[in-house]
Image: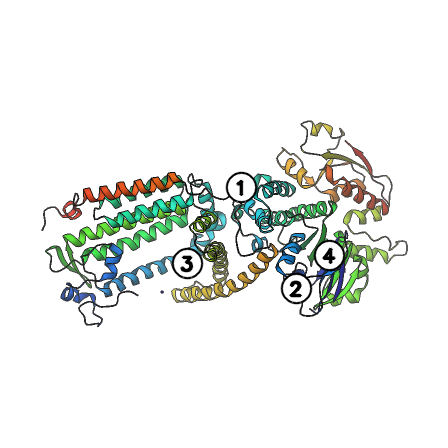
Amino acid sequence: MFTVPVSVRHLNRRYAGAGGRFRYPRFYSTRRTENIHGVMLFSGLSGGGVPGSAMLIAAAVCICTVLCIIVYKARSGNRDGRGPYRKRRGLSEQVQMDTLAYGSRMVGWSPLGKLLFILCIIITGLLTDSILVPICTFAIGLTMMIYSTNLKIPSILALAIGESMLIMIIGCGMISIMGSASEPAIWDTDILLFHVYITDASFNLAWLVFMRSAAGVTLMLAFASSTPIPHLSQALGQIKVPKEITEIIVLVYRYSFLLLEEMQIMYRAADCRMGFSGFTKSFRTVAGIAAGVFSSSIDISDRAQNALMCRNYSGTFPVFRSPKKISVGWIAAVIVSAAILFAFGQYSSGWINISEVFFGGIR
Amino acid sequence: MNIRIDDGIKTAILGANGAGKSTLFYHLNGIFKPKKGMVLYKNEPMVYEKEYLRRLRSEVSAVLQNPDDQIFSVTVEEDVAFGLLNAGMSVGEADVRIDEVLSAVGLSDFRMRPMRQLSYGQRKRVAFASAIATRPSVLVLDEPTAGLDSQMAQEAMETVDQMHHSGTNIIMFTHDVDLAYAWADCMHVLCGGSLIYSGDPWGFYSDSAKTAVSGLVPPTVFAIDKSLSASEEWSADPHPRTAAELLSKISGKNDTGTLYLIPVRSNISTDFWEKLPKSGVKPYIGVFGVNTRRIISGMRQDCMLGCIDSCMEEVISGNDAVLVYDDSAYGIIEKRISRIGVFGAKIKTVIL
């Protein structure tokens, strides 16, 4: 049969009013009339002043928080059997996400229809000034998420929600305390390095941004928890996203989890060799693991390529059960929902003043 | 290196770590292209072009050692369909084929399950199913029992035997000397990138120097047989390959127990337990075949279930045993029984 004769990632760094020079947050009051457009892009509204250095501090706080969570998880996992060890008794992240997506009551819905609906109502929320629209979209997202997951939210998704909420609270808190000096303050005080100057506009803006972000998170999570990656890939293919991109999405999804598993093995191995016996050692170990995961990725990619070739892979991941295509009903639902939300936003603009709710008649 | 692998022969390729097994493995379905020399398939040199390789890889399926390396899809059915759809098969045709192969590996109930919910052994079986889904004429296995417990390994080898019995050529790459010795008809041994032996298994282990050079150790059955051969009244031939054959050779008696055979077609009738012989001692029960194992595992059991070899050992020891097996695998069982006879013990069989 065989004969083988073989010789074998800018933050807007304008430092507003500081002449391009870095200033400490303490001096913000001297240049509060300046605006940072990066934040306005995020909020989608004009007004409000947030110096770039404050954003830098906020970003640093967020990054440090996330890093601390990672190191804490790794260390607590070593001490009391939580963290990476708990997963051995339960299901890995990929299994949780796959089980959630395939078990979702919305899995049979058209992925492209869902994506279009979610994007349209998020954009509609950004186009209107009324806070009621993001509240409505948040309610829609929450309802969809509850319906999709049946409140069985896996730990990785709960962690994602928690972390995004933390970042949103920090970000919106910063927007809130950095009101424009040209406006009367609701509350003006000094807390540590920060000069807190809350104005009616900054407070309302912070809430608007928060609600928009929260709505976006719930809507996107509703989508993520009900759409398996192969379905997403198919949906993107239907809107003519280049197949190279859709294939990369599928491959990244699959192999990122393999790398995560590899990382968990390394965590355990490092723990066995007392790699987490001290704060500095823990950081050094985490750095070593990161380097190890990088070299493992090369090895995994090599084996994966051979295996893909063995199974006749020709650059496209075939999908056995194609998800439902987008129907006229979906397009109609998207247009009607967006139109209703936009009209409601225009009509309800100025109905609610959040600062009045919290600070009463203080002006 | 010059290796010839013939049709219909159970072939094992052995070698210590670093001997060149993996390199040779990837040459068999055109993943690697030799720098020198050539690989012939069906007496034709391999052509390293897209269309030829697509056809070749449909005919020569490979099962990698680690199933996680070759599993790309989220659910079981999607993964089995992966190779089929890549080979140009329609979704409807693939649907039928998926049912067929999942049933063959005993995973019909797992069709819609996410892959990563399965155990390692089950993932290994999915890898098998994916490989045989294209109905290959050659199945190349890299360490098929690696990482499996003994029960799982037993089941995996039963699947391999059944596939071979149904006409698929099996080529197994392994460093499990006991497994290769018991299973293979022909063995090729690699050492340092070179082929040092081709032929029957006992021929290789009989050459102590070659065995030592290869970095392999003789299989247990072979070692016992060889030690016994040192005595004058012990004949070296024939060479037993399994514990049952060795026992047959040692006992050499004709009065064995009775092996009751219960063939299973699609299901086991409710009076299955009634069929068992009524004697004072509960008979030893063995199971052979993927379908039978799946059915039996769903039934209430108050006894330990063995395999074909343990049934034979029981019978040779003078006790009765019952073997419940896939009807389609009768040829394999008949062959095993007749081989036991070669070593002296004549097994009495009764089909119930």
Mark 1: which amino acid? Met
Mark 3: which amino acid? Arg
Task: Determine which of the numbered discs, if any, sits on residue A75 in the image.
Answer: 3
For the point 64% across and 38% down, the residue is B294
For the point 65% across and 36% down, the residue is B296
Q: x, y (%) of residue A3?
A: 74, 61
Q: Earlier in the sequence, mark 1 or mark 4?
A: 4
Label 4 crowd (10 A; few <14 / some 14-19 / many >=20)? many
1 and 2 marks in contact (CB < 8 Å): no
Label 3 crowd (10 A; few <14 / some 14-19 / many >=20)? many
| Mark 3 secondary-structure assignment | helix
Task: Determine which of the numbered discs, if any, sits on residue B12 in the image.
Answer: 4
Along the viewing direction, whichever of B190 and B312 lies nearer the viewer? B190
Kindly report the distance in space between the C-alpha atoms of the residues bearing marks 1 and 4.
Answer: 34 Å
Would residue B62 appear left or right of A36 to someone viewing this image?
Answer: right
Residue designated by label 2 = B23
Mark 2: which amino acid? Thr
